[in-house]
Amino acid sequence: MGRAKGEAARTKSRPSSSSTAASLLPSGVTAVGFGGYVGSSPVNSSLASTPDAVPFTDIDGEVAQHLKRLSRKDPITKLKALTSLSQLIRQKESKEIVTIIPQWAFEYKKLLMDYNREVRRATHETMTNLVSAVGRDLAPHLKPLIGPWWFSQFDSVHEVSQAAKRSFQAAFPAQERRVDALMLYSSEIFTYIEDNLKLTPQSLSDKATASDELEEMHQQVLSSSLLALAALLDVFLYSHSEKPGPENVTGELKHAVKARTIAVSSAEKLCSSHKYFQDFLKSQSPAIRSAAYSVVKSCIKNIPNAISEGDMKMLAGTILGSFQEKNPACHSSMWETVLLFSRTFPDSWTTVNVHKTVISRLWNFLKNGCFGSQKVSYPALVLFLEIVPSKSITGDKFFLDFFRSLWEGRHVSFSSNTDRHAFFLAVEECFIWAIRNASRYCVGPEAIYLFQHTLVDEVLLGFLWPEYLLAASSKNQDSAFSTSTLDQSKNGIQSNHKEPREALNSKHSMDYEESLGKCIVKILSGIQRLDNNLFLVFSSKFQADIFDIFHQTEYSSQNVQWVVKFILLLDKHAVRNGEIWPLLDLIGPTLQKSFPVIGTLDSPDAVTVIVTAVSVFGPRQITQQIMCIGLGAEEFLKSFIETIIPWSLKKFSPSTSARLDLLLALLDDECFSEQWDAVIRYLVIQEKVSFNPGTMDRNCISVLAILMEKVKERTKKSVHQSDQCEDWHHELLDLVAVYVVQAFPQFGDSDARFICAVLGGGTIDDKISFISRKTVTLIFEEVLRRLMTFMKDSTFAWVQDVCSLLFNGKKYSDWRLEPSNNLLEMAHFVLDILNGSLFCLNTIEAESELVQGILAAIFIIDWEFSCINVSEDKLHKEHIGETGSRLAFCEAVHAFRCKILDQFLRGFGVNNRKSLGTTLVQSVKCITFVDKFESDNFVSLCGQWTLDVFEIFCQDQVEEQQLLEQFLNKNDSWPLWVIPDGTGARLRTDNVSLSLNAPNNTKFIALVDKLISKIGFDRVVAGLISEASPSSTKDSLTDLGINKTHYSRPWLAAEILCTWKWLGGCVLDSFLPSFVIYMKNGDCGFSDSILNVLIDGALVHGSCSGLNLLQRASVDELEAVAEPFLRALLSVLSTFFQDNLWGNEKATSLFKLLVDKLYIGDNANLDCLKILPSIMNILVRPLSIGAEDRTNDLSDPYSESKLHNVTVDWLKRTVCFPSLSTWQSGEDMEDWLQLVISCFPVEVTERMQEIKPARYVFPAERAVLYELFQKQRHGASAVLNKLPLVQKLLSELMVISVAYCWEDFDEDDWKFVLHRLRFWIEAAVVMMEEVVENVNHTLTNGANDVNASLNEFESAVVISDPFLIELARNALVGFSLFCSLIGSQDKEHTGNLNHLGSEKWEIITDRIFEGILRLFFCTAASEAIANSCGHEASSIIASSRLGHRQFWESVASCVLQSSSHARDKAMKSIEIWGLSKGAISSLYALVFSCKPLPPLQYAAFVLLSTEPGAQLSFTCDTGKVSNDGILNNEDSFETSSAENVHLREELSYKLEKLPPRVLEMDLVAHERVNLLVAWCLLLEHMTSLPSSSPARERIIQYVQESTSSIILDCLFQHIPLELYMGSSSRKKDAELPAAVSEAARRAIATSSVSSSVQFLWPIGPEKMASLAGAVFGLMLHHLPAYVRGWFSDIRDRSASSAIEAFTKAWCSPTLISNELSQIKKASFADENFSVSVSKSANEVVATYTKDETGMDLVIHLPPSYPLRAVDVDCTRSLGITEVKRRKWLMSLMSFVRNQNGALAEAIRIWKSNFDKEFEGVEECPICYSVIHTVNHSMPRLACKTCKHKFHSACLYKWFSTSHKSTCPLCQSPF
């Protein structure tokens, strides 16, 4: 009750969670006065009384309005009214509130019946506000309120009941006052409760309420009323009966006496009328039953005298037989009632058939695990045993059946640990109770003992003990116990073998085993205290089981574990409590008898039993029990030396470890020295070790190794480890250690174990050593000797050299290192020692050379391992064989270094660190310059070595910089371009080959680049030391405090910039981004040093850049510059100005510097003149900042005025030169003209979307520039110089003139410009058409060999004259400028002031556009033709465009501006050309190109999706021959769309045949991209078709039948659904990428995906996600039924809910708004049909009337439309039969749900269906519709026999599904 309609049904008898189930279990007294009463069963409250409402007299109008709203049915309205009412109550005076109480009382009673829990809760909150406001004025109105008020405090919903209690407590703060109020109106409360108990579901509410809600409300009324009654009786009677003495009665108030009298009489009356509530006890509702138990219990407790003998007999059968109750919610009150009833009426047992009514039901109750109420029922069992009359049962049989039933129910009782503990506690308590109370059921000692013995034998030994054996051995369940062990189990244990293995596994957990064992121990403690003879029964069985296991040697190792576990349980639950019986009566006797057997066994587990016993009871106590001696020290020591030591050390065997554990466990503090000396001397004979080592037993070393490891573990646990070490030290241990490390061959694996055990130092905290320091030094010297021998044997020369370097001049250099055949074995031996004792080196710090040598050797061997891995592919087979044997050891050294060596090195000495670090970094540098290794992996490896050295050996960044200086020192191959000069740099002037491919230099640069990427530019290049943590390896620039030091390395930066490319990287990818990040922190001095070096180098090696100076070159284009210094300079300038690191001030200073260098006296510096244009191309933009706001203040000599003056000067110098038509090569006019062109760049936005001047120019500049243009125009008109360079310069000059001087142009100027532009474009067209001809010829006449054909394709696409492409590129830029000027002139309506009227130049612009389109179709046709030869040929064509990216981007930009007329002519010309591929095929090849150029692909997409190309892109054949041979267009789409729609193969192939495993493809795979683009084309085509056109319907049917809905799964692989999973489904824009949601919304609003396709390339995950969102939105718009069908098939609920959330948030609102708007605008209404739209409710009401019939149909659009189908409901029908009404309703539903388009169209077709039916047209007998719901055809195919007509599609489906061709009605052949 209280849930919203539509929620999943959930009854109150079945809680929704375990916590709710627990809350349903009442405990204790139901209510003990106010503040303590608890309503325990969850049901709802209601009120049956409905008195007439009090008139709204003297009530404020606003309050009255809200009170009236409380009578509404809608819960939302009630909640709002209650909220408003609460606010008004808080605002108004008390007197005003009093007037509304009568009316409020009336509404209050009704509101308590409300089904909605929130309404009831809000009602009580309003009540709280009201009583707080009126105070004492509430008293006159309590009478009608008190009954419902009390009743509501037992609401099933906790929040509601608590709100009711708070309101009552607000009215009566003191508990006494609350009790007084209840007593004062006790009669009214009892009357109210009595009335409630008489209610029926029908009398609760009106007929409009659902029957299931009424039933829940009725259950709520009954359960709450019963609980209220029980609590009221406890308040009035129970609390009174507890007050001692009769004097309290005399002092009581009269109304209290009266209340109790009324309570007794009312209770008796209710008990009588309801037969002691037996009907309620048998109710189907658990809540009612539970409440009824509470009432009966309250009556028994408070008015027992009122229960007559007859009533008692009547109740006995019901209460004592209540164990058939299966709902755990009722068990608490049930048990309380049963126990109280039995105690109050003990004779009641004689009135029932005990076995049938009580016992049999109790057994079933226990066997079923108390039906889930373990926490309540198990604790009550022992109380139940107390009350069971002994005469009513047979003692031994009863208890045996009791325990068997209880035990049988255990497998369903363990839903939680709490349940398990409750079960075993019940078993323990009941068993001990039965043992102790045996005299109740037996007469005489013998009978009592026999009864007790039976229980022990049958219960404890019958199934408790065997179950424990099985549980304790559950890990070895496949191994069985002996037959004698398990066969002794009786009935209980037998059930275990019938349980499945899963039940055993879940039952035999650690907790289960622990709980069962504890239960047994507690039972044994109880038995032992009661009767030791009974305990001996178990002790005998325990010993027999152990003996049985020991005698079964095959299984002793597996099953003895239960003994150990049981001993530990005895310790935990008995020994620690001071009990001594486990040792004296159980374990001691058992071990005494077992010790001889254990001695004969070689079983570690058997010895473990004794070890465990020693750890629990103590060494002397166990020795006393085993040896039968006293506790004295002498006897104990004698037994230890003579018996225990020989027994423990007699031989090396599998049980040796366990025997040594026992040996150490038996060491006693008082006798420790004597015991330990005896152990060592028993193992080591000094004479044998000193004089004849070969005679020493190898087993002794193995035993010593194990023993010392165990001693170390024991010492670690000691608080005083140093003292303990001294205690364990023995001189014989030193002797053995030196002997073992020098002996060869070694004894075996135990050698290293022994050395590590006595050395210690396995961890940084391990300071435990059992030998002297001198012995430690000898051991590690031997370790170093063997490591050096291994290094000298390396196959890498650098390893041998480094080894010599490390030990040259040291005291170990004179060692003779002779190779050995056992070199690897020796190496592994010393590595094992280091692995186990590395930190022991800290104890010999004085031997620094020794420690340093060992650590260096480890590093070099680790590097050798890395080298072997990197160089393995380049080694010869014999070399691999040589190194393969070393690889395993090197790998082990690597693992060792990674594991613990770094931690050890952090505490290394300063001088040792610096010395070793320098040696290691020089070694890395030496390795890098080996020509043999040229892989990026190897360079990365060297970089990682260097970083490791820095990290380990540098304590701060100063030390790191010093190591870097050593690392970057000059050598023969390094550096190549620039060398350090103090803190600066200078050019290298010695005779060095300036080759870009110097391998050694580039390899070392690659290594330096790796270091920069790892530790930062600031530390490697800038040499800065931050004030942050010295040891930080992160980006130190995060700290603003930076210190400049003399470690700055500008020479290194210049060297890297000049090198440009290196192994695995280049300047643009890694170095420049790092440089930029550093520069953003403001170290300008460093960058100035680099800049000066680069400028000097560029001037020395001066050469032209070869860049396009019309527009600012991008950083990527700078790679084409050949000269290293100029390329480096331009890349730095371009990057820094582009990222705003430098601004106008820096540009001005550079401009001044370069202008000063340009002139040498009056002559120009030609080297500077060559590099200046490319530099000015970058500087002109920052120099022009603020030019538009220029003032007359010329105080700054290097401001914009300086640029203006210098530019004018350069222009005038250029004007002085003769015309380009007379220019000859070799003159410097070219450089000056290029310099001028660089000063007037044009700005081209991305993808040529806009072209405009890049800076503001002054009139003087424009005038001189125009003068230059005029001079060149006149010269070119007179004489045409065809030199390519002249044409290029002229084209560039023409572009900048159009950009900056177009306002000065006259008509002749424009004619000259346009004709030259057309000429250059046409020249490129001719060249590209030749390319297409060559490609086509290669296809038709090429070689059959694939490789030869590919070579021919490569030759065919070679551009014969690249200058033509450059000229055409410049021409396209100029033409784009011209078109933009025409557009702006047309928009501004300025007339033809500049001769730019669009009509004047229409003809020539069309010709130019046609030429551009021919260029476009040339490259498209080339790729289409090559695509016929395969992917590789197509890739060759596509790749050829990438070399001229700007040209083709300009072509694509102009194509998008072309007119449809020009496009049509270009397409027709391609078709007339006669190539193997036409225009449309060419466009498809371009849009699906394997190497996309984004503007070209988008232009191809636009041409395919717009006119005139759209008509040719989709070919649809509308004709179809029907089955009877007649051409029928109307039925043409009724069967298979493949016969009706014939899309072009380029498109249909991608739509119909999805790539295999498409869902497993990469998200940006080429095939996946093409698939989405194909769908975009199809959807764009659907948009262009009218909504009701047959062509569109055929396309829709084609999609449904021929395409796969997997495309939608693909879409949602791109859309981030995880943001809508779970609770995040309520979130919107905060987390979803804006591009996805906006794309979906825009596609729906514009009915186009063009904008998403435009920016799709270059492909990326975010762009694909945006396109996927757009495609999904448009598919929802055009194909809603198609998408809905896919959505309904999704089985992943989380995915479907996320998809629905996305759709509801971003798609549905726009779609719903569009649908409703279209329906509102539709014109299908007539005299019979009308439509009304409600946008607020998302509903459409369609009314159809005809003659005297009519119906109203409501179409409701769900929030996630169209994923969820629309709901259709008939709200009114007149003159229509129910059958027809349902048929018409289903008809409309079919139309609107199958419509792939607008709902308005579906409604129109449905209306036509009605019209046809009323006109007498027969409906199809299959679908019962006149118009087909999918293809909208009429029934035309008639049966020749019965004459009924069918839809073609229906008949086709009937034939295909029934597998026969007979009429569906008459079954005659069709």
Image (cartoon, grey):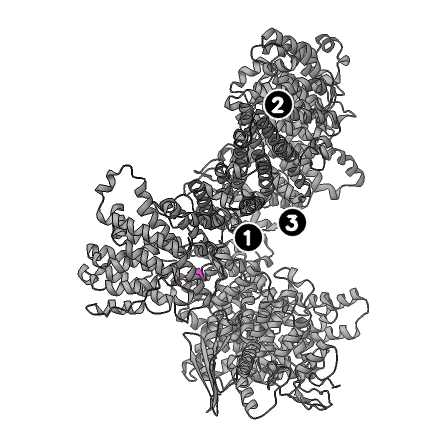
**Residue 825 x, y percent position in the rendering:** 74, 26
In-front residue for pair 470/1457:
470
In-front residue for pair 250/63:
250
Secondary structure found at label 1? helix
Residue 1767 lies in magenta, yes or no?
Answer: no
- Whether residue 121 sits left or right of residue 1231 in the image: it is left
Q: Nearer the viewer, mark 3 or mark 1?
A: 1
Measure the alpha-carbon separation of dots 3 and 1. Answer: 15 Å
The kind of residue on which mark 3 rests is Ser
- Whether residue 1017 sits left or right of residue 1846 in the image: it is left
Mark 1 / mark 2, whichever is N-terminal: 2
Measure the alpha-carbon separation of dots 1 and 2. Answer: 98 Å
The disc label shown at residue 995, or none? 3
Measure the alpha-carbon separation of dots 3 and 2. Answer: 100 Å
What is the tally of numbered marks visible in this picture? 3
Q: Residue at x 64, y 41 (%)?
A: 505
The C terminus: image quadrant: bottom right
Q: Which residue is mark 1?
A: 1128
**Residue 1440 x, y percent position in the rendering:** 66, 66
Compared to residue 1844, the image places residue 1265 above or below, namely above
- Whether residue 1210 sits left or right of residue 1469 in the image: it is left
Secondary structure found at label 3? loop
Can you name the residue that lies furthest to the top here? 634
The N terminus: image quadrant: bottom left
The kind of residue on which mark 1 rests is Ala
Residue 1185 lies in magenta, yes or no?
Answer: yes
**Residue 414 x, y percent position in the rendering:** 56, 43
Q: Which residue is mark 2?
A: 536
**Residue 237 x, y percent position in the rendering:** 32, 46
Can you name the residue that lies furthest to the right here? 1344
Compared to residue 1050, the image places residue 1809 above or below, namely below
Q: Residue 721 is drawn in which quadrant?
A: top right
